[in-house]
Amino acid sequence: MNTCLLSGTLQRSPAFAVRSGLSICRLHVRIARQQKRDGALERAPFDVEVSTFGKSAERARELRRGARVTVRGRLDPYQARDGNLCVALIADELEWAGR
């Protein structure tokens, strides 16, 4: 099973494109995380790139930087230009506050 659920804050306003009639939206979501270091809790946030397509991408047009979002999707591995293996999150569902 390849299912991922995450919740975080948009770091930038979404980037939109239309290719071959398909709407595409890319989001950069910051995930808040804490980790223990030397016995003390320390903030250690990280960013996840999320892509959504079709009607979900069109609905995401109203999102802006700082919005809280919850994303359910699947992980999609790919090889970056520098040769490193990376993972992207392809969103099946996208929810946000005020919606």
Image (cartoon, grey):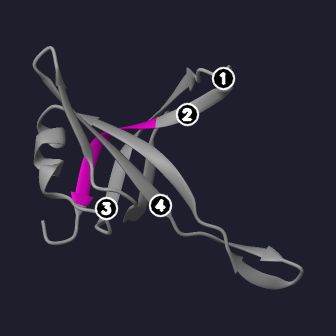
Q: Amino acid at mark 1?
A: Asp
Q: Residue at 59%, 24% (x, y): give it.
A: 80
Q: Earlier in the sequence, mark 4 or mark 2?
A: 4
Q: Earlier in the sequence, mark 2 or mark 3?
A: 3
| Residues under numbered marks 4 and 2 in contact, where contact means CB atoms less than 8 Å apart | no
The extreme bottom residue here reads 40
Q: Place residue 44 in its image quadrant.
A: bottom right
Q: Secondary structure at mark 3?
A: strand
Q: Which of labels 4 and 2 is toward the front?
A: 4
- Real-space Cα distance between discs 4 and 2? 15 Å
Residue 69's tag is 3
Q: Quadrant of the image for the C terminus?
A: bottom left
Q: Residue at 42%, 56% (x, y): give it.
A: 29
The extreme top residue here reads 20
Q: Earlier in the sequence, mark 2 or mark 1?
A: 1
Residues in magenta, as a range: 89-95
Query: Dot 3 surroundings within 10 Å: few (below 14), some, or many (20 or more)?
Result: some
Q: Earlier in the sequence, mark 4 or mark 1?
A: 4
Q: Earlier in the sequence, mark 3 or mark 4?
A: 4
Q: Amino acid at mark 4?
A: Arg
Query: Dot 2 surroundings within 10 Å: few (below 14), some, or many (20 or more)?
Result: some
| Residue where numbered disc 2 is placed | 87
Q: Is residue 6 left or right of residue 59?
A: right
Q: Which of labels 4 and 1 is toward the front?
A: 1
Q: Which of labels 3 and 4 is toward the front?
A: 4
From the top left corner, tell me how far across and down residue 91 is, in percent.
33, 40
Q: Residue at 72%, 79% (x, y): give it.
A: 42
**Relative to 20, residue 68 above or below:** below
| Residue where numbered disc 1 is placed | 82
| Residue where numbered disc 4 is placed | 30
Q: Residue at 25%, 51% (x, y): give it.
A: 94
- Real-space Cα distance between discs 3 and 1? 30 Å
